[in-house]
Image (tube, rainbow, N blue to C red):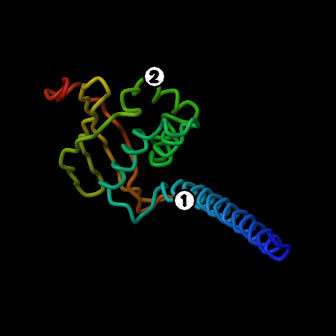
Amino acid sequence: MTRAHETKAQAIDSSKRQNSLIVAAMALMLISIAVLVGMSSARADETLLAPSADYRPQQVVRIVVDSLQDNSVNTNDSGIATVFRFASPVNRANTGPLKRFTRMVKTGFSDMLNHSGARYDEMEITDDKAIQAVWLLTDTGTEVGYAFQLGLQKSGEFEGMWMTDAVIPLGKSAQSGIRI
């Protein structure tokens, strides 16, 4: 191989190494961007999951039920915290603060946490009150029901927002059992 060929081969090798480094740097940058977007999306979701006059009562029940289902996704009980944010001021006064509320959910309503599915009965809305039965499918195949009672807040910082006044256990459904 002549000196000119060696120099050309070295230049090609150097160029290939530079291209590999550029590709690796771009891949790392794309991964970093994806992580940052995911983190900001999670933060955005957390801020979106708060009471709003834009939410209809059916949406509030779904947000609460979905938050309970996804509670184990985070180790910080963020699902339970979301449920607490949607609790009416009177409900919070009776069940809070958050630490006490979390303990209450984990001990008295543990079958609501991380359930595998939900079935919603039709919601009944009368003036500023709404009630809906929700049937949660546990990982053992048991279906347990809860009546969600919501109230439209008339004053204060939550005026015009639907919030949970109470959750009443309904027991096991006739449809409980192992599903195929």
- Compared across the picture, whether 46 is left or right of 168 comes to right
The residue nearer to you, when weighing 92 against 17, is 17
Query: Residue 154's x, y, as percent?
Result: 41, 59
Which amino acid does the dot numbered 1 rest on?
Ser
Disc assigned to residue 108: none
Which amino acid does the dot numbered 2 rest on?
Thr
Q: Nearer the viewer, mark 1 or mark 2?
A: 1
Query: Residue 12's x, y, as percent?
Result: 74, 71
Q: Locate residue 161: give its quadrant.
A: bottom left
The residue nearer to you, when weighing 36 against 97, is 36
The residue that disc 2 covers is 107
- Compared across the picture, whether 72 is left or right of 4 comes to left
The residue that disc 1 covers is 41
Furthest residue toward front: 1
Residue 97 seen from this side: no
Residue 57, compared with residue 89, is above or below; it is below
- Compared across the picture, whether 120 is left or right of 6 comes to left
Q: Residue at x 53, y 42 (%)?
A: 78
Furthest residue toward right: 3
Q: Mark 1 falls on what kind of element?
A: helix
Q: Report crowding for label 1: few under 14, some 14 to 19, many 20 or more residues within 10 A (C-alpha).
A: few
Q: Residue at x 54, y 53 (%)?
A: 46
Q: Residue at x 20, y 24 (%)?
A: 178
The answer to whether marks 1 and 2 mark residues whose Cβ atoms lie closer than 8 Å is: no
Q: Quadrant of the C terminus?
A: top left
The residue nearer to you, when weighing 105 against 12, is 12
